[in-house]
């Protein structure tokens, strides 16, 4: 591929070079070292930390020495996925890049354009001698894809700029200007149980759409854990039914699309089957338009040695699941259609002597986030659940007055002949972390067209990379 690099050749040369370095999340030392060697070679100030974050600075062009520094920011890591036909070892091997028509992609793997293109743009800017620019402060973070740990642990004291261009969006012409912050409420409801030989039912809430809790939460998608709570509540009205275990969801940022319940019983088999079937029919009608593939599967077992919770604990768990806040709490008054505050009961897991839960809270307003966290904690206390907060990251609140946004919109309109789309998202971005470190930071997130990110079909538009490169250079001239 190196013989036929598309223009801008310096951008695609660096994109190719970093694609030959293994850089999956949690494996970013080599790519961080590559950037450090780049800085040494070009005699640029740099700082590399123990988290594999790296900051590189470049002085302004002669005519821009009186300008304030501009931050260019992206992340070093990528999501590593491959097809069954690929034998790549992501820990040690680079990607096999291909070009077809306007698209660049990797054979049988993810491309890593999220966020390799930001790294390539940044290195091309640092390497250039003919692009006018203010002082540049390049921030390249690690492990963004697995929790933004790099950004969280970055020492911001070396950063003087207060204008930040985050190149980590996938739709050309869309400027992201705000994102939610978040925190998780975690807890365990402890129980005494006994091992019994009993009849029972294995029940599966199945076929829901699920999705990202920051992106799809506003689409009113059903949460399997919540549905399981309501079903369990109905089943516990039958005198002999007890809960054995309940498990649903694996990630805090995903709406659970399945949940498994196991219950024991001594008699009333017909009543249990009727309850499940009636509940299933009612929910199928309720979710007919939004969750067309929803179903409840169940199988009876006989004389199985199994863990059985007492009635009081079983009922407490069901009551908590039926009352815990979940879904959209409030909508933004500044941006039409934007969810302001939400919660997602992302994980239920039966452990040795407790049932663990995790609710992910998101909000673009810190006060509402705290209020919702307190509400969940108070409710949990009512049912004897011990809770703690974890995973806090700050919101990137919408700025009604943004010098950077105004300049970028003006330049975009001149270059493209139309207005850009101004967007806020309910998911978390690194901009929120950085705004928490410097509350006067003016940020915009943008990027070229990248399709099917985090999948083996990931591909990036070459012509879009070219247009965004021209756009970046023009923005730097005008800041």
Image (cartoon, rainbow, N blue to C red):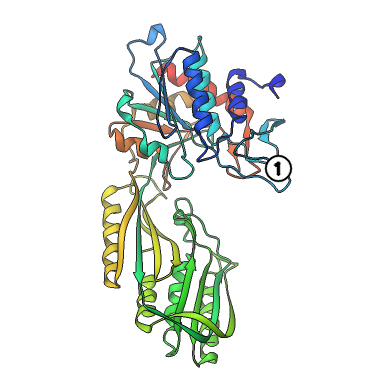
- Quarter of the image that includes the C terminus: top left
The residue positioned farthest toward the top in the image shown: 62
Please tell me which residue is depicted at 40% across the width and 65% down the height of the picture: 356
**Could you say whether the residue bearing mark 1 is in a helix, strand or loop?**
loop
Residue at image mark 1: 87
Residue 101 at x, y percent in the picture: 72, 30
Please tell me which residue is depicted at 38% across the width and 82% down the height of the picture: 310
Q: Is residue 146 left or right of residue 451?
A: left
How many numbered marks does the figure carry?
1
In the rendered view, would you say 445 is above or below 64? Answer: below
Residue 251 at x, y percent in the picture: 47, 56
Q: Is residue 310 left or right of residue 196?
A: left
Where is residue 194, by image quadrant?
bottom left
Residue 213 at x, y percent in the picture: 46, 54
Q: Is residue 146 left or right of residue 158?
A: right
- Quarter of the image that includes the N terminus: top right
Q: Nearer the viewer, residue 305 or 25?
A: 305
- Mark 1 burial class by Cα count in 10 Å: few <14, some 14-19, many 20+: few
Q: Is residue 78 left or right of residue 395?
A: right
Inspect this view and state whether residue 417 appears.
no
In the rendered view, would you say 164 is above or below 297? Answer: above
In the rendered view, would you say 222 is above or below 240? Answer: above
Q: Nearer the viewer, residue 426 or 113?
A: 113
Residue 372 at x, y percent in the picture: 30, 58
Inspect this view and state whether residue 134 appears.
yes
Please tell me which residue is depicted at 26% across the width and 65% down the height of the picture: 378
């Amino acid at each position: 591929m190196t013989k036929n690099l598309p223009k801008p050749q310096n951008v695609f040369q660096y994109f190719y070079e970093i694609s030959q370095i293994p850089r999956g999340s949690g494996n970013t030392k080599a790519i961080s070292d590559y950037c450090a060697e780049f800085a040494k070679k070009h005699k640029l100030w740099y700082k590399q930390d123990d988290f594999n974050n790296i900051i590189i600075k470049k002085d302004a062009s002669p005519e821009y020495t009186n300008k304030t520094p501009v931050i260019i920011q992206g992340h070093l890591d990528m999501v590593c996925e491959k097809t069954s036909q690929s034998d790549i070892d992501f820990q040690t091997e680079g990607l096999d890049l291909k070009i077809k028509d306007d698209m660049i992609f990797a054979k049988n793997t993810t491309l890593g354009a999220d966020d390799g293109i930001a790294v390539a743009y940044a290195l091309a800017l640092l390497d250039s001698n003919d692009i006018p620019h203010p002082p540049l402060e390049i921030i390249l973070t690690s492990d963004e894809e697995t929790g933004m740990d790099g950004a969280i642990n970055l020492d911001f004291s070396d950063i003087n700029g207060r204008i930040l261009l985050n190149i980590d969006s996938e739709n050309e012409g869309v400027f992201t200007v705000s994102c939610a912050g978040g925190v998780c409420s975690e807890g365990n409801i402890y129980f005494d149980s006994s091992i019994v030989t009993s009849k029972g039912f294995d029940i599966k809430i199945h076929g829901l759409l699920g999705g990202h809790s920051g992106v799809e939460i506003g689409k009113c998608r059903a949460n399997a854990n919540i549905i399981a709570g309501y079903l369990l509540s109905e089943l516990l009205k039958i005198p002999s039914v007890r809960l054995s275990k309940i498990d649903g969801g694996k990630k805090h940022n995903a709406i659970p699309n399945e949940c498994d319940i196991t219950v024991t019983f001594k008699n009333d088999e017909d009543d249990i089957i009727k309850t499940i079937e009636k509940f299933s029919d009612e929910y199928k009608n309720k979710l007919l338009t939004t969750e067309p593939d929803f179903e409840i599967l169940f199988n009876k077992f006989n004389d199985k040695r199994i863990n059985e919770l007492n009635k009081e604990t079983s009922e407490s768990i069901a009551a908590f699941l039926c009352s815990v806040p979940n879904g959209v709490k409030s909508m933004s008054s500044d941006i039409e259609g934007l969810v302001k505050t939400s919660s997602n009961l992302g994980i239920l897991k039966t452990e040795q002597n407790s049932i663990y839960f995790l609710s992910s809270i998101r909000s673009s307003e810190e006060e509402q986030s705290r209020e919702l966290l307190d509400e969940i904690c108070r409710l949990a206390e009512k049912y004897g659940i011990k809770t703690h907060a974890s995973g806090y990251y700050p919101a990137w609140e919408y700025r009604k007055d943004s010098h950077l946004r105004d300049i970028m919109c003006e330049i975009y309109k001149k270059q493209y002949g139309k207005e850009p789309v101004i967007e806020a998202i309910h998911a978390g971005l690194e901009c929120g972390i950085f705004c928490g470190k410097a509350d006067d930071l003016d940020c915009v997130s943008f990027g070229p067209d990248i399709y099917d990110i985090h999948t083996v079909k990931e591909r990036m538009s070459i012509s879009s990379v070219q247009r965004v490169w021209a756009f970046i250079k023009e923005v730097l001239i005008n800041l």
